[in-house]
Amino acid sequence: MSDESIRRKQARSFDHLSKTNSTTPKPANFPSKVQAAGLNPVDWKIQARGFLVESYPAVLGSDAAGDVEQVGEGVVGWEKGDNVFFQGFYRNERATFQQYTTIPADLVAKIPSKYTYSQAASVPVSLSCAIYGLYAPKPLGLGLNPKIDSSVKQTGQPALVLGGSTSVGLYAIQLLRYLEFNPIIAYASLKHFVYLKSLGATFIVDRQQVSLADLPSAVARASDKPLKVAFDAVGNAEAQEAGMSCLVEGGELITVNSTTKSDSDDGKIMLAVFGTVHLPHTRAFGNVLYERLPQLIEQDVVVPARVEDLPNGLQGIVDGLQRLKRNEVSGVKLVGHPQEQSN
Ligand SMILES: NC(=O)c1ccc[n+]([C@@H]2O[C@H](COP(=O)([O-])OP(=O)(O)OC[C@H]3O[C@@H](n4cnc5c(N)ncnc54)[C@H](OP(=O)(O)O)[C@@H]3O)[C@@H](O)[C@H]2O)c1
């Protein structure tokens, strides 16, 4: 498929999101000073393929941690200087690869004191993707825990995460652990074995040794129970197909490729997730998430990804996006610092 037809296909598939966004209510906003901005694959994909963004010049970036610069009119419970983190969006006034941005007050969390700006900025987008996919009510996600309630359990049920060492995969593993899935099977490079185990994976299938085509038999060896829940954090057609093949009838696969059409095959369902708190139909779950998030992080239910701080201010972000595009980032989140001077 040519780049142009990919671009057109993706532009079409995001049409509904853009339209719903234009009716987003206007709650009180914080102007916020961005101290750290996480990088995501979508940031280079938007530039390369031209989707999600509607007008130019466009500022990108949708992960941030920083300081409340000014408290919006009518907003209570926040003060100038509070350290906060939040998910941005693909509009200039919500983008995070800039020194200042704005954020609705109901979609912000305070940074727990044990974490840095960079660690906090690594969380929002990747966590959103994983938690909307697994916990948000249907049809946003699988609806496994719509209130993010600590008493909800799936004890002893197996689950699979393809792409366990992706930033999204790390959170999918942790969210499955919170529900007491067992085993939690991660398809990832063995070099991440210890790290993924520390987050809750109980069985690693080494992607250097086992092809995606052989994944179903490796999963069958890892669990004698039928697999009903799988999370594809890779997002290409091969990973989706492998994930679907591992499921039993009635099983459900979440895929991170939000341009894929949700589908069903052989009594199995594939659901594409778009992890954002900013659309009218995703916002209610976003409110639940941002209310619970400081506690989930404080209690180590959600542990931020390992981070690599990029030097050189905004230019460092441009360089980091090139590394993401070249697939040179493994098991770590790149974080830029818009307040720093670029060379
Ligand atoms: N729908 C949404 O809302 C949403 C939100 C965020 C991200 N995404 C998408 O989710 C995907 C992951 O994003 P991310 O930020 O988590 O990526 P990332 O952290 O940059 O991904 C890098 C990791 O991908 C792993 N990987 C690459 N190919 C793999 C394969 N075939 N099998 C298993 N692991 C593989 C690499 O593992 P090794 O270390 O083994 O090389 C590396 O650790 C991207 O496609 C992104 O666009 C979607």
Image (cartoon, rainbow, N blue to C red):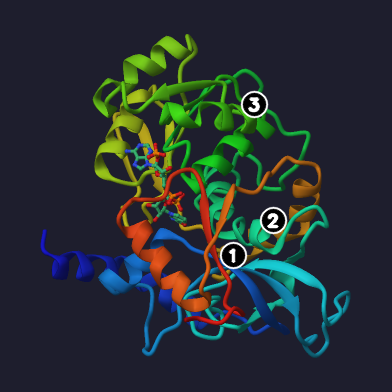
Secondary-structure class at tag 3: loop
Q: Which mark is residue 289?
A: 2
Q: CA distance from mark 2 to mark 3?
A: 20 Å
Name which residue type carries label 1. Val
**Horizontally, is 213 left or right of 264 in the view?**
left
Looking at the picture, which amino acid does disc 2 mark? Answer: Leu
Tell me where residue 286 sits by quadrant: bottom right
Q: Which quadrant would residue 103 be assigned to in this image?
A: bottom right
Estimate the spatial distance between the alpha carbons at disc 2 and disc 1, rounded to whole Å: 9 Å
* Label 3 crowd bin: few (<14), some (14–19), many (20+), radius 10 Å: some
| Disc assigned to residue 277 | 1
Q: Please say if 142 is above or below 8.
A: above
Residue hosting label 3: 154
Q: Residue at x 83, y 57 (%)?
A: 113
Q: Are marks 2 and 1 in contact (CB under 8 Å)?
A: yes
Residue extending farthest to the front is 343
